[in-house]
Image: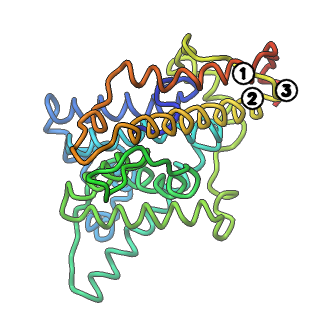
């Protein structure tokens, strides 16, 4: 039930890979070995407001102090890596930066509004890179197609997006005041996606900085290309090639799930068929075989390699 391109790992997603490895490793180290340093990563808005500890807006919003939040957010980032492949690392990083800054502003506004209106005090909010994670649900809801995989008892539909929403709900219920962070992230994602007040032009990664990171950090976090996938590259630029690849992988996912649903409905009866919920490996392989043959016919022409300088 993972999103499309699930079989290709973290190829062409170096930023997502770095967000999976670095914050998760630091979170585990803080939880197991360096617990006396956790106080520096507490997201305390009262300390920011009263003592002007502005640095907590940075330290408190990078590393999760709860390992459950670390696990759930890492799974979500892994699934949301599709946006880095579609948009490119620079645009994806700009979205994360913009939503991270906007969500911090909305955190302060929401806490003050609820304290003034309902006398609800939320001094400590959950720490970690949670605002941008919730913000990514906005493009996920708007741009990822919904494909039905199966049904439970003939009433409840299970789609390719169901597991992602379940992970989001699990993360939403992990803390007392995490609803503030979730609401701020969703608002920030809507503002950035809809280009409210041209925030996508103001809060973006400069081109020179993106090139600097691509020269220094991208070789460290880059992943090798999967050997079991077909190379396509008929576009004139790297961006077009990337978009073609994403469209082909999305089409493969939708076709394979359509074939899989047809096979399941053919054997559906009044008795619950447990193979609907736990399909075997052979069934998945047979369901995906027509898509592979179709993709090989579509890309029969040799790929055209272009360099990054042609962007």
> Where does the N terminus fall, quadrant-wise?
top left
Q: In this rendering, would 21 be left or right of 32?
A: right
Q: As drawn, which residue projects farthest toward the top?
A: 227
Q: Residue at position x 60%, y 21% from top? A: 292
Q: Quadrant of residue 305?
A: top right
Tag 3: Cα neighbours inside 10 Å, few (<14), some, or many (≥20)? few
Residue 258 position within the rendered picture, expressed as x and y whole percent measured from the top left: 51, 39
Q: Is residue 122 above or below residue 284?
A: below
Between residues 154 and 189, which one lies in front from this camera angle?
154
Which disc, if any, is residue 241? Answer: 2
> Between marks 3 and 2, how big is the CA–CA gap?
12 Å
Q: To which residue does mark 3 refer?
A: 310
Describe the element under mark 2 as helix, strand or loop: helix
Residue 29 position within the rendered picture, expressed as x and y whole percent measured from the top left: 22, 29
Tag 1: Cα neighbours inside 10 Å, few (<14), some, or many (≥20)? many
Which of pointers 1 and 2 lies earlier in the amino acid sequence?
1
> Between marks 1 and 3, how big is the CA–CA gap?
17 Å
Residue 33 position within the rendered picture, expressed as x and y whole percent measured from the top left: 14, 28
Residue 137 position within the rendered picture, expressed as x and y whole percent measured from the top left: 46, 55
Q: To which residue does mark 1 refer?
A: 232
Q: Residue at position x 47%, y 67% from top? A: 187
Describe the element under mark 1 as helix, strand or loop: loop
Which of pointers 3 and 2 lies earlier in the amino acid sequence?
2
Question: Of discs 1 and 2, which sits in the foreground?
Answer: 1
Q: In this rendering, would 54 be left or right of 123?
A: right
Q: In this rendering, would 194 be left or right of 308?
A: left
> Where does the C terminus fall, quadrant-wise?
top right
Question: Of discs 1 and 3, which sits in the foreground?
Answer: 1
> Between marks 1 and 2, how big is the CA–CA gap?
7 Å
Between residues 133 and 286, which one lies in front from this camera angle?
286
Question: Of discs 3 and 2, which sits in the foreground?
Answer: 2
Q: Are the residues flagged by discs 1 and 3 in contact, CB closer than 8 Å?
A: no
């Amino acid at each position: 039930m993972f999103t499309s391109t699930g079989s290709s790992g973290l190829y062409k997603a170096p930023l997502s890979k770095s967000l999976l490895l670095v914050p998760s490793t630091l979170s585990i180290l803080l939880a197991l070995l360096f617990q006396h340093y956790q106080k520096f990563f507490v997201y305390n808005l009262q300390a920011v407001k009263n003592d002007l500890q502005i640095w907590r807006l940075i330290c408190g919003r990078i590393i999760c102090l709860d390992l459950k939040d670390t696990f759930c957010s890492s799974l979500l980032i892994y699934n949301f890596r599709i946006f880095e492949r579609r948009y490119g690392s620079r645009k994806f990083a700009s979205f994360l930066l913009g939503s991270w800054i906007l969500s911090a502003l909305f955190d302060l506004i929401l806490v003050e509004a609820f304290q003034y209106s309902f006398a609800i005090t939320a001094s400590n909010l959950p720490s970690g890179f949670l605002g941008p994670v919730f913000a990514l649900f906005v493009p996920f809801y708007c741009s990822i197609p919904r494909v039905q995989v199966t049904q439970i008892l003939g009433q409840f539909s299970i789609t390719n997006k169901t597991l992602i929403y379940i992970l989001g709900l699990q993360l939403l219920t992990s803390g007392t005041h995490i609803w503030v962070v979730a609401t701020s992230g969703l608002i920030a994602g809507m503002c950035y996606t809809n280009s409210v007040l041209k925030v996508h032009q103001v809060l973006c990664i400069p081109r020179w900085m993106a090139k600097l990171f691509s020269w220094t950090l991208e070789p460290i976090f880059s992943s090798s290309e999967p050997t079991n996938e077909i190379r396509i590259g008929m576009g004139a630029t790297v961006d077009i090639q990337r978009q073609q690849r994403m469209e082909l992988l999305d089409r493969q996912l939708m076709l394979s799930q359509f074939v899989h649903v047809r096979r399941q409905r053919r054997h559906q009866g009044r008795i619950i068929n447990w193979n609907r919920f736990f399909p075997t490996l052979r069934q998945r392989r047979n369901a995906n075989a027509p898509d592979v043959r179709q993709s090989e016919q579509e890309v029969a022409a040799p790929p055209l390699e272009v360099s990054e300088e042609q962007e």
